[in-house]
Image (spheres, rainbow, N blue to C red):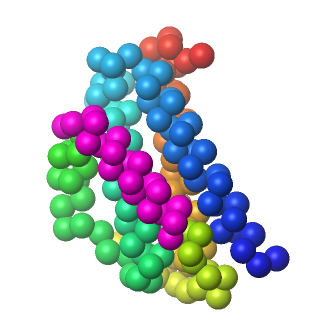
Amino acid sequence: MPRTLQTYLESATPNAAKDLIAAFMRLPEDKRAWSPMGDARTALDQIAECAILNGYVAQTLKSHKFIMGDDYVGEKKRVQEDWDALKALFEENTANAVAAIAQTPDEDLDIQVTTPWGEPMKLSQIAAYPFWNMCYHEGQINYIASMLGCLE
């Protein structure tokens, strides 16, 4: 069936974004940048990852090249400094990813792109990445909430 993947992701991805932000907002404000142990990732760090990578996905779907910033770790730290700016970036890059998914023609879905991790991925996999990644991080944030006793 033509456009099945794009149509599904066009509606599922914004829902995953909404659910991820809801999980984050459930955490007490003073625990959003809290690490449950040692080097464990904070909820804020996970939102920052999704915000940045959703933007990379949008660019990749349009250009067929996965270009990651030279200072991804630094970029991720910088965007965590201002919640309002991070939330705006998350919303903008998620909307850009959804638009790029919707505009990806069926015939492009099998195009392979080399990722910064050295392995090739089809554009169909890259299109699904924001949805998958946000669902995954919703679970991680809900786990933090369960440790804090604030999971509904």
Q: Is residue 150 above or below residue 96?
A: above
- Report the side of 98 relative to 46 (left or right): right
User: Residue 118 placed where, x, y %?
Assistant: 39, 76
In front of the other: 110 or 59: 59
Observer able to see residue 11: yes
Q: Is residue 56 above or below residue 46?
A: below
Q: Residue at x 69, y 65 (%)?
A: 7
Q: Residue at x 47, y 21 (%)?
A: 26
Observer able to see residue 49: no
- Report the side of 99 relative to 28 (left or right): right
- Report the side of 12 relative to 122 (left or right): right
User: Residue 106 placed where, x, y %?
Assistant: 66, 82
Assess whether residue 25 is covered by the magenta stretch: no
Residue at the right extreme? 1
User: Residue 30 placed where, x, y %?
Assistant: 29, 17
Assess whether residue 84 is covered by the magenta stretch: yes
Q: Residue at x 28, y 36 (%)?
A: 84
- Image quarter where the N terminus lies is bottom right
Dominant SS of magenta comes to helix
Segment tinted magenta in the rendering: 81-100
- Image quarter where the C terminus lies is top right
User: Residue 19 placed where, x, y %?
Assistant: 56, 37
Q: Is residue 107 above or below residue 2?
A: below
